[in-house]
Amino acid sequence: MCSFSLFAQDYFPSNSGVIANNSNYTAFTNATIHVSPTETLNNATLLIKEGKVVSVGTSVNIPKNTTKIDLSGKTIYPSFIDMYTTFGVEKPKRGGNGPQYGASRSGYYWNDHVMPEQDVMASFKYDAKSASELHKLGFGVVNTHMPDGVVRGTGALIALNNNADNAMRIVDGKTTQHLSFSKSVTSQQRYPSSIMGSMALLRQMYDDAKWYEAGHVDTKDLSLEALNKNKNLLQIFEAGSRANLMRADKVGDAYNIQYTIVGGGDEYERIDDIKGTNATIILPIDFQLAYDVDDPFLASTLSLSDMRSWNQQPHNPRLLAENGINFALTTHGLKSNKTFSSNLMKAVENGLSKQKALEALTTVPAALLGKSDVLGTLKTGSYANFLITDGDIFEKKTKLYENWVQGTAHVIKDMTVKDIDGDYTFKLAGESYKLSISGSTGKSNAKLESNNKSLGTKLNYSDDWVNLTFKTPDSTKKEYIRIVANATTNNSLNGKAILPNGNELTFVANKTNSSASSSDQGKDKKKGDTSSDAPFMSPITYPNLAYGFTEKPKSETLLFKNATVWTNESEGILENTDVLIKDGKISKIGKDLSNNRATVIDATGKHVTAGIIDEHSHLAAASINEGGQNSSAEVTIEDVLDEEDIGIYRNLAGGVTSIQVLHGSANPIGGRSAIIKLKWGEAADDLIYEDSPKFIKFALGENVKQSRSRTNSRFPQSRMGVEQVFVDYFTRAKAYDDLKKSGKPYRKDTEMETLAEILNGERFISCHSYVQSEINMLMKVADQFDFTINTFTHILEGYKVADKMKAHGAGGSTFSDWWAYKYEVNDAIPHNAAIMHNAGITVAINSDDPEMSRRLNQEAAKSVKYGGVSEEEAWKFVTLNPAKLLHLDKRVGSLKVGKDADVVLWSDHPLSIYAKAEKTIIEGVTYFDLARDKQMREAIKKEKSELINLMLQDKNKGLKTQPVKKKEEKTMHCDSMDSHY
């Protein structure tokens, strides 16, 4: 029928014998042919020649020199395309030992993890064994790449033709450019060490590529040359999660690049945000296994979010399709490719239409790769890449017989063997039997029951003849019955049974079930069908975990009556006073207020205050430190906000409404801050203040000189070196800024841009600090370059230098009573805040800790005890003063008409340990309500119980489960021994 010789280049030598070119046609007749996902022909013919489709239709003219294959009762589909694999590529080996800070290559980009020059074909080796496994799943073509680095180089499109040579297997040797947030394993270069570092690296790389392309660089950079050369290729970004998908798209948007993004299967959580990216998703279908919840104690430790993931993930493809989001399916991410087919069926069972499934495996990847003319369909001129099945390929019992690639057959199951799989019943000697046969076209298996008792049985099937031997139902006797029967039809077995006594009886077994008829093939449930057998899906909430909202809350008009109101303004504390909130603002404060549209809240005996503001926090961030360099001014926490951090909800329960999410203290010059409102349920970018003040984290002391590190060799290693870092970088930043202002061409450097903003008074410093000598040092450096340190945070020796801080103009954000947890805080005292306050410094109490941040009201009270500060001034330590330090006091921090309605209703005196936040409101939206919290706890119990029952059902069906693993919460503060936050 065909010969591999037709694929060989005519100038290649041959040592395999006589060369014979086969120019005959092959016709597959009488088949149901899915020409494309939207075009199906019944009783049709597919005509191929020399690896291509010549014709397809119901009245194809068949030439004389044609081999005919009758496929009556069979179905043909285009073979599948997996556009994201590492097929034929050896896993990169880890290289180097110890820390590395500079690049290891010459003539390439300054960062080893940027390798656009990497060509997958340089290391590609065809893997026939892996190809055969992919054939069984229906794949005929794969796009492969080297999975190593932030920029990974180019991919290639390979036909899985085991009988061709590499020259013909290579459909296209350069199809795609690949990127990720993950470093190369072959280099030990430390930077980047975080997601935000990878994002900053990509941005700087694109800026450098533009500068290089414009001819401003005298030296040769092979990486940037390759990057510019590859920019017209399809850009595939491996994100691996919904959150990283959004981050990747953010980078792409900044440079007008539309990435095709490898998702994580959790896109359903924010489907509107995903749709807004306009990205096509390469979608893994690595669905979680149910948890083994037999042990009630272990089951109780499962988080609702993990349980929901198991239940909701199989619905993800359907939801993407229903929302018009383009996607292709991939085997990527599967621990075993063998689970691909079962997961695909599961997606279909959970509502993914068969047409969309087929598109995601054929026409969508073909279009993305620019190969619609030759791949993805069986139209004239396409590669002869197709599957032969016995029915609907999206039905579990359907058999895949052959996978043809470039006109070459790869046999999965022998379709000349009659398929006798199914369930049968028969009677012998007064006994009734149930027989189940599977794998008859391969390795046959049989199960036999009589009177609900399983009988030992052995089956052999060959040349349409069945030989069956089984034990008699009488367990007291070790006797066997032998059956010889012919599979005369698809629905019965006919022959004779030989009993233990030698008597022969006529044997007839009739099939009780059969696969779906061809008339039923391809039928999907009608759109909108909500039949009772549809799989249950837990509701998606915002965020999609415990205590999330089923609908995002909206701003309300609220009227608090008869409260004790802490204004933080000249009016002081007002008794029996009303507060009206309207349009997200404080509308009125006074007595006997009314509003016909307002929801009235009786606050008699309760207290209303401005929301608490935490000047120093690390909540709601996916990564904290970028410590790969001694300066990371180019990174920003805004890139890595995590809106699903349960700490947001817990802080709302403690009356916190705003926080500064700071970079860690791994290096002297850290990253830029994110100042956010704790709008539980909103997307990450929507947490950030509009027109947010610009801040950056600096750090001094043990952390930045790596006192507790055994391996680091990065500069600086001493407190003297820390000072030199600041002087060096600000000297460079000034030179950079002068060049920029001169109007001459300059290479954009995000790190220098950020430091220049400090010099120009456009960005403020929040500096991690302890020891007075270093505090003095940094103020002197700032004076040298004519800027001011905005805030010394921690500042536990601030009481020693309060006069100098006042003269410099610095504020202090400190702990209430932390001391002696490491050597450089031995001199800390709980009177620190009061002493700095009395010296005229703007003082705030911060948390730097996810537990302490939930009780900052109590932390503020400690300054009343230790320092004799008035209650009203102590309350400002966690409200108005941090607002001043963050340059937000015109918006928040006090209750004043026109300010944002960031308000807390307390059950008791806000400085009391007995006070509870009954309502926490941000811009008129109630994000925490104590009564709702109580209701949610009951709803969570009910939902977890429902999901546990479903998991138990899975286990009882014999499906695989995964063990419950205990999770540990991370400690997040600047002086964690594990990671310098």
Image: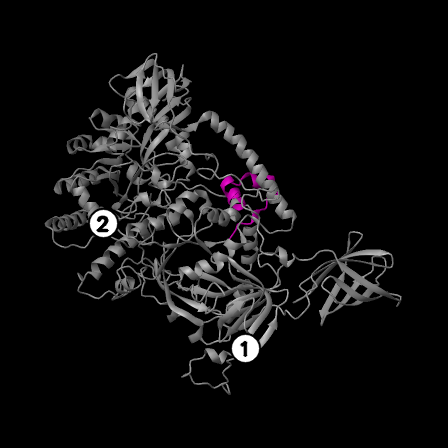
The image shows residue 570 at horizontal and vertical percentages of 24, 18
Determine if residue 468 is in view. Answer: yes
Residue name at image x 63 percent, y 57 percent: 519
The one nearer the camera, 370 or 518, is 518
Left or right: 744 as drawn, with respect to 331: left
> Is 398 on the left-hand or right-hand side of 268?
right
Question: Measuring 85% from the left and 65% from the top, which residue is drawn there?
Answer: 506
Q: Is residue 330 visible?
A: no
Looking at the picture, tell me which residue is in the foreground, 175 or 824. Answer: 175
Instruction: Return the x and y of residue 782 as percentages of the image width and height.
Output: 16, 41
Q: Against 200, is 437 above or below?
A: below
Q: Secondary structure at mark 1?
A: loop
Residue under label 1, please give it. 63
Which residue reaches farthest left? 742
In this picture, which residue range is highlighted in magenta? Answer: 286-311
Indicate which disc, 1 or 2, sits on the residue closer to the N terminus: 1
- Image quarter where the N terminus lies is bottom right
Q: CA distance from mark 1 to mark 2?
A: 70 Å
Residue, far bottom? 18
Q: Which residue is disc 2 drawn over?
A: 751
Residue depth check, mark 1 versus mark 2: number of the one nearer the observer: 1
* SS at circle 2: helix
